[in-house]
Image (spheres, rainbow, N blue to C red):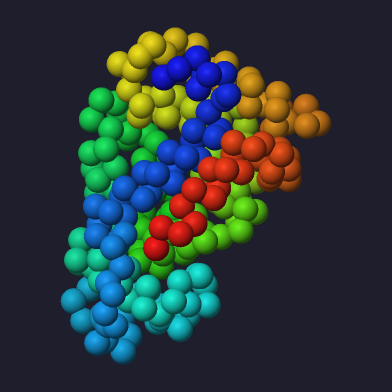
Amino acid sequence: MSARWESEGLQTVGIVCLVIMFLKLMHLLGLIDIAETESSDSDLELSTVRHQPEGLDQLQLQTKFTRKELQSLYRGFKNECPSGMVDEETFKTIYSQFFPQGDATTYAHFLFNAFDMDRNGSIRFEDFVIGLSVLLRGSVTEKLNWAFNLYDINKDGYITKEEMLAIMTSIYDMMGRYTYPCVREEAPSEHVDKFFQKMDKNRDGVVTIEEFIETCQKDENIMNSMQLFENVI
């Protein structure tokens, strides 16, 4: 972890970690490698799962994936998640495998809540593929809205210092305490202060979605991170 990495703040790191780890999770679930052959199924296979996802036509309208891509994504999801859903503990277990040197539990909790759109304690295939569509093929504004939703822990439309500190601390915990050079204990709080100095335009103590998007769109590092994985699948 270099001095430059610390000086640039963690909002970019948070977005990059989000996308990279989401892709690693997809790889573990067998979702990255899209099959070259057409599926013999006329629609999603539903007989062996408890949760029945929406039909392909509806998911095509809600995402930017083709019918073939959705079929391949669903096969991979179903192979790893026969119930058709992923609960939070399973999600944390999968996610933590990529950070053996740290504790990814809290960050995985925040990420899980960002995907669990209907707040029912599980990620359905629809939740998963809609989030994937935004992160990989969404517009810059759609991706930033998704990131804002991750940071807005209580979903009240504002990012507070307390919420941002929780996110920053979870990222440091996930990266591990054995990085070099060592991370100072006060570093998360310092990054929260930098984040608000940059984002909180009217100095009212909270960051709105408008302030977040406007500031991010002017940050070259963040804009570059938004385009890293547009052609992954």
Residue sitting farthest toward the right: 202
Above-or-below relation of 218 to 131: above
Residue at the outermost bottom position: 42
- x and y percent of residue 81 in the render? 22, 62
Residue at 35% x, 29% y is 174
| Vertical placement of residue 170 versus 188, above or below | below
Residue 62 visible? The answer is yes
Could you tell whether 66 is left or right of 73 in the image? right
Q: Is residue 2 shown above or below 39? A: above
Query: Residue at 53% across / 28% down in the picture?
Result: 10
Q: Report the residue at 65% width, 54% height from top.
A: 141
In the rendered picture of this protein, how many numbered marks are placed on residues? 0
Position of residue 7 measured from the top left corner of the image (x, y, whole percent)? 57, 18
Q: Is residue 169 left or right of residue 138?
A: left
Residue 89 visible in this rendered orientation of the protein: no
Question: Which quadrant does the N terminus fall into?
Answer: top left
Q: Residue at x 27, y 38 (%)?
A: 98
- Residue 119, horizontal then vertical, whole percent: 44, 55
**Quadrant showing the C terminus:** bottom left
Residue 109 x %, y %: 38, 41
Q: Nearer the viewer, residue 166 or 78?
A: 78
Figure check: 208 above or below 196: below
